[in-house]
Image (cartoon, rainbow, N blue to C red):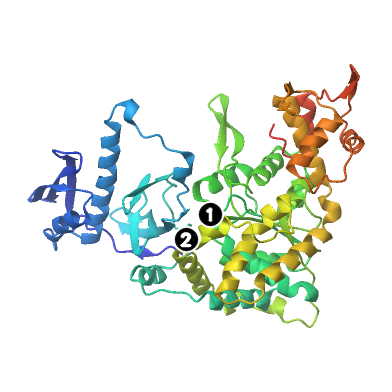
Amino acid sequence: MSELVTPYQPDYTLQWEPGATKATVVLRVESETGELLALEEIRIRSKAARQKFIAGLIPRCDSEDLESQLMAIADESMVRSEHGRSATNHDEIDVSEVHRPERIITPELSAFTVPVLYSSSGGVAGKWLQYAVSGSERSKVELSPMMRYQGDRFFLELIPPEPSVNDAAGWSKESRERWLEGDADVDAVDLFERLSTSLDYYIEFPPERRHGYLAVLTCWIVLTYLYHAWPSVGYLLVNGPASSGKSTIFNVLKLLAYRPMATDNVSAAAIYRTLHNYGGTLLFDEAERLRDTRSPDVSDVNSMLLAGYQRGRGATRLEKIGDSFVTKSYNVYGPKAIACINGVVPALQTRCIEIATQRAAKDSPKPKRSLEDTDWQGLRDDLHVLTINNGRAWVKAARRRDIGKSLNGRDFEVWQPLLAIGAWFEKAGIGDLVELLLGTADKSIRDTATLRTPEAEETILSVLSEFIREGIVLDGNERTYQPISAEILQICKQRAPGLFEKWSPTGIATRLRTYGVSSIKSGGRREFRTRLEQLRDIQERYGIDLDL
């Protein structure tokens, strides 16, 4: 639960106006009775100047509150200064410079944003505090549209709505304070083993897969705190018969994953907005309803899931504004866990790492164990500390391409984050972890081979859609809009060479006919002149993302 923190002193007001230069501002501080406490021009972005100004007001004013206000003034003065330039002198911001508000991971900065509650004259209010480490400097500041650390600017995509009593701070106040003081440190091997032991204490795995599944789940939980460093993240698919422990896994994930969001009786619109505003880990239980593609709400959820495993792929919705509808894009990127009995649609299956569950034996003590047996808060605190302290390492891990060389295409895309995290823990002292993860990946891919066949179909349909929609240039010739089977196969081999190595043009045509897509003979060519309306219908019926 979010904690109450000491309220800011309400017995003074701070006003400011631009100073004689762009670097200075004039500050005016008055008491509640109108007594002038300070009137001074200072270099607002100088830490030493701010501290000197604050020292002259203690004990009349709260130093922490005053520093927070001065930092906000520094940001605002910079924004005003930049807006005062001519339009031709404005700095253009690249999209790579815009960060999510909940988590920043760059080579220069690692930060978490935490919701806190505090008492105010009107009762209880909430705000967002960002805890960050830049170089060796640790800090706590209130969230603003532009954050500044050691001279570098970090622009935020948005400022989330004010937190309420229902927004839990996963990182405890005590742990945050110890971290700020520089005392908090975490032994990586010890944390990995405690996470794995806690999972094993409650969850019954098939004996032959137990060690592999424990490694996958442990690394995936760590990934939920780090996914902002990766361009894509594999979903966790928990699949098994009724009463086989799927709900137990989800109950544990609710206690360990970063910002967990359960979807029980939640509409598609609420999921879109929550992920966009707050980020975090989506926990989607009883996913059988995702097969009901006739439901508009389910279609929206499927679109969100198909787009949300890659960073930068927004999911769009038609929002009703007055009497009309407006298209709005939502950032739904992030880790998602899906639980079901009968599997998911083929296109979604290829984005998942599957955990197959089984019912516990009658004499197993695991189903009867209480979740209160474990110190979940301690694990969450250590997860925050471990992952914020090693920001540069995670950026490097996300760029690794030397692990999982036996995996191709989307398999590599989905598994690389876990393999890279596993390699980091292995270097810290967990033996043979990458080999264990790779073995689990190979078995999982073989187990789902029959379900994964549609991955080829999705690629074929996506290539055909691109031809029809905007054309593709082949071998330096003119743009082609009505391809033949051999031309579709040519592009498919370029994009997924391992998948289409043994395919023929006839196989392409045969597979497209199963979706009602046929070619027409024209001028010695059998061309596909498929209408976009037909491709949109395939996209909706089969849950295949064709970017239409």
- Residue 499 placement, left or right of 100: right
Residue 298 percent location from the top left of the image = 71, 43
> Residue tagged by mark 2?
391
SS category of the residue bearing label 2: helix
Q: Residue furthest front?
A: 476
Q: Nearer the viewer, residue 442 or 346?
A: 442
> Hey, what amino acid is under mark 1?
Ala
**Given the image, on which type of amino acid does mark 2 rest?**
Gly
Q: Residue at x 80, y 78 (%)?
A: 361
Give the residue furthest to the top: 523
Residue 161: x and y, percent? 44, 47
Q: Residue at x 70, y 37 (%)?
A: 296
- Counting residues from the N terminus, which is met first, the one under dot 1 or under dot 2? 1
Up-down: is 480 above or below 78? above
* Figure quadrant of residue 406: bottom right
Neighbourhood count class around disc 1 (C-alpha, 10 Å): few under 14, some 14–19, many 20 upward:
many
Look at the numbered discs 1 and 2 and tell me whether their residues touch, using CB distance below 8 Å: yes
> What is the quadrant of residue 459 in the picture?
top right
